[in-house]
Image: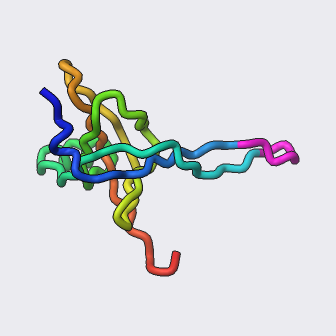
Amino acid sequence: MSIARWLNRILEVWRETTEPDGAGGQTSTWVQAGEVRAKVDQPSAADRMLAQQAGSKHTHTIYLADGSDVHRGDELRGDSQTFTVHATLQPSDPRYLRADCELIQRQKGT
């Protein structure tokens, strides 16, 4: 069974990369690594409690098509929202990829 019909948003995948700065250090930049179709949901109370016990924030659960190139540490951006991916999980019967994320709310003008 495909979950494609529920994936109602397009989100950009952004990934942090590092490059030598020429002075012995590194410079970090965010680059767009692609786009994915997604469904953005609120997590259950139990999911939020588990995240809090682990010292993580879980404000949104994002469902993606199986095989989506999304990893821990990536950012998913779209519709004026930015989500930091804290974990990705796949069920034992891989039909989708689940990303446990935190919505980053930026101050206006930043």
- List x then y, in percent, for residue 27: 72, 50
31 horizontally vs 62: left or right? right
Residue at the limit of the structure toward the top, as seen here: 92
In the rendered view of the protein, which quadrant contains the N terminus? top left
Characterize the magenta stretch by its predominant secondary structure.
Answer: loop
- List x then y, in percent, for residue 79: 34, 64
Q: Which of these two is toward me, 49 or 26?
A: 26
Q: Which of these two is toward me, 89 or 56?
A: 89
Residue at the limit of the structure toward the bottom, as seen here: 109
Residue at position x 64%, y 51% in the image: 29
Any magenta on residue 20? yes
- List x then y, in percent, for residue 65: 28, 35
- List x then y, in percent, for residue 89: 28, 31
Residue at the limit of the structure toward the right, as seen here: 23
Residue at position x 86%, y 46% in the image: 22
- Tell me the magenta residue range: 19-25
44 horizontally vs 73: left or right? left
Any magenta on residue 68? no
Q: Please say if 94 is above or below 12.
A: above
Q: Please say if 89 is above or below 103.
A: above
Residue at position x 74%, y 45% in the image: 26
19 horizontally vs 107: left or right? right
How many numbered marks does the figure carry? 0
| Among the 4 quarters of the image, the one containing residue 102 | bottom left
Residue at position x 33%, y 47% in the image: 56
Q: Please say if 34 is above or below 105.
A: above
